[in-house]
Amino acid sequence: MLTALLGLAPIVIALLTLSALFSAAETSMTGASRARMHQLEREGDRPARRVNKLLSDQETMIGAVLLGNNLINILASALATQVLTAVIPGPWGVAAATATMTVLVLVFAEVLPKTVAIVRSDDVARALSGPTLFIVRAFGPIIYVIQWIVRRALRVFGVKLDMAVDVLAAHEEIRGAVDYHHSEGLVETDDRRMLGGVLDLSDMDVSEIMVHRKSMVLLDADLPARQLVETVLEAQHTRIPVYRDEPENIVGVLHARDLLKALAEAKDGVEGLDIAAILREPWFIPDTTNLKDQLNAFLKRKSHFALVVDEYGALQGLVTLEDILEEIVGEIEDEHDTALDGVRRQQDGSVNVDGDVTVRDLNRALDWRLPEGEAVTIAGLVIHEAQTIPEPGQTFIFHRHRFQVLRRQRNQITALRISAPLAEDADI
């Protein structure tokens, strides 16, 4: 019997070593940095290329590793049980084999290798990429059969999965990584906002950031040339829509640079200007266009200005390239801009806010966390939460802030006072 035990020991050690490698491969592959692997692959690193190939079909890779790991652990347990039951007959031999193999597998084939793999995920993944790729190719057909059986079984419970289902959305994975590193102090707040702004572009429509038609500066094409020039000089913008007869009838866009060039070339001075001749054709876009598509359209068309219309063709507002860039980098100010326009800080920590200030701008300016998906403006958020149009003087507590309505013009809230974030138990 002693000879059998001594003969069994090298086999069990070899099987536990293989099991440890499988466990380390599984943990390191799932924990490896995809960004670093891609960078190393571009630099010509072959192990990193194998890791990326394995991660491209992560479900098959994990299934093959688990299959190999379970086969080895079961084989090692069966051999140990066979020998120990010969030494200790009956149920006590089975119990001894179970206890012994449980401790050996748990310590040496699971906890120890997985701990090393967690600490050095990238290095372990690259070192084990070759054997793991071989196992995946060997067990690949079996894994596909298992996946098919699993999906068929899940359909019984109403869960339908495609064979190429992607468990993690790339954007959410990146956003989670950015938030995590920010909480660890490795990513600065401004960088986190910029990275988040890039990810948000495809989820936002131009209607959420456009300058509303009530706030647009418009020029009447029938005004005298001198008055038009004076209006352009007083405006803060270089591109101004021009209408005829009614504001909805936009006939062109006047660029301040074109106006200056025409003034320099005019022989009869301001009175001899032909404004209609220097107008640029207006570009109309639907209000449902997402920011990512509109940014690409701006770059492709080499234009920085577009007018937004609804499904009926009615003018809703305007959007510029700068508006979209500000969603990424924050407010872009020049010598003609006013910092935090419409937001006035008070000595008690609260702020007086114009109703048309957007929720997103307020969050960026004050580092608040008011919800941005329920309404575009602060006034819209209060109306959404209150489910009514409040009267001046009414106060509400939403999202850990106290909102007091200061002014209302007809059905529009024009000014509010918002407190600094309240304690957690004040959120109702």
Image: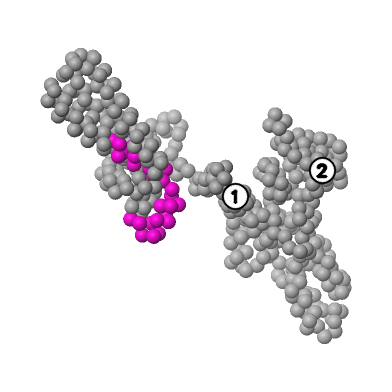
Q: Quadrant of the C terminus?
A: top right
Q: Amino acid at mark 1?
A: Glu
Front one among 351 and 347: 347
Q: Position of residue 364 (x, y in %)?
A: 68, 49
Dot 2 crowding, Cα within 10 Å, few <14, some 14–19, many 20+ = few
Q: Residue at x 77, y 36 (%)?
A: 402
Q: Position of residue 184 (x, y in %)?
A: 55, 43
* Vertical relation: 61 (above or below) 324: above
Q: Secondary structure at mark 1?
A: loop
Q: Residue at x 42, y 33 (%)?
A: 155
* Among numbered discs 1 and 2, the one appearing first in the sequence: 1
Residue 174 appears in the rendering: yes
126 vs 83, left or right, is right
Task: Read off the magenta span.
Answer: 19-46
Label 1: which residue?
188
> Residues at badges 1 and 2 in contact (C-beta under 8 Å)?
no
193 vs 411, left or right, is left
Q: Report the predominant secondary structure element of the magenta stretch.
A: helix
Dot 1 crowding, Cα within 10 Å, few <14, some 14–19, many 20+ = few
Using the numbered discs, state the Cα–Cα distance from disc 1 to disc 2 in whole angstroms: 28 Å
Magenta stretch: includes residue 37: yes
Badge number at residue 383: none
Q: Amino acid at mark 2?
A: Gln
1 vs 295, left or right, is left
Q: Quadrant of the N terminus?
A: top left
Q: Secondary structure at mark 2?
A: loop
Front one among 290 and 326: 326
Q: Where is residue 317, by image quadrant?
A: bottom right
Badge number at residue 347: 2
